[in-house]
């Protein structure tokens, strides 16, 4: 698949307490950020091409196509920090 520079496909997890919870796809502002929701995963349910009136719930996963920079802003800071590797120092004397 050919994608324009700066655009991509990614899965966005909607955690409890996210500003997206309780909003429709239209009301979420995702389209204004140039992000299109391709598929919504809700538990064991897969909803391809969800309607704009679909309400986002906590723990939903959204498969999206859009501006990569815009999608990066949707990743909670806690998640970004958890992805940083933890470096442990080994003792000098390892015999």
Image (spheres, grey):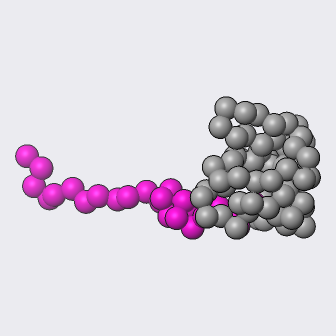
The quadrant holding residue 7 is bottom right
**Residue 77, x across and y down, in percent:** 57, 67
- Work out which quarter of the rendered image holds the N terminus and state it: top right
User: How many numbered circles does the render carry?
Assistant: 0
Q: Is residue 89 magenta?
A: yes
| Image position of 1 with respect to 16: above or below | above
**Residue 28, x across and y down, in percent:** 82, 64
Q: Is residue 68 magenta?
A: no
**Where are the magenta residues, as a range?**
71-95
Q: Main secondary structure of the magenta part?
A: loop
User: Is residue 45 rendered to the left or right of residue 4?
Assistant: left
Residue that appears at 91% across and 46% down: 51
Residue that appears at 90% across and 60% down: 26
Residue that appears at 69% across and 48% down: 60
**Viewer-proximal residue, 88 or 55?**
55
Residue that appears at 76% across and 54% down: 56
* Res. 15 visible in picture: yes
User: Is residue 82 rendered to the left or right of residue 87?
Assistant: right
**Residue 8, x across and y down, in percent:** 81, 50
User: Is residue 13 rendered to the left or right of residue 62?
Assistant: left
User: Is residue 17 rendered to the left or right of residue 42?
Assistant: left
* Res. 66 visible in picture: no
**Residue 38, x across and y down, in percent:** 85, 43
**Viewer-proximal residue, 25 or 71?**
25
């Amino acid at each position: 698949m050919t994608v324009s520079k700066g655009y991509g496909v990614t899965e966005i997890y909607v955690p409890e307490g996210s500003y997206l919870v309780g909003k429709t796809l239209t009301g979420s502002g995702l389209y204004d950020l140039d992000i299109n929701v391709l598929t919504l995963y809700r538990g064991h349910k897969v909803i391809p091409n969800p309607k704009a009136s679909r309400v986002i719930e906590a723990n939903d996963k959204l498969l999206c196509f859009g501006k990569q920079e815009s999608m990066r802003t949707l990743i909670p800071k806690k998640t970004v920090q958890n992805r940083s590797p933890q470096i442990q120092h080994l003792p000098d004397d390892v015999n």
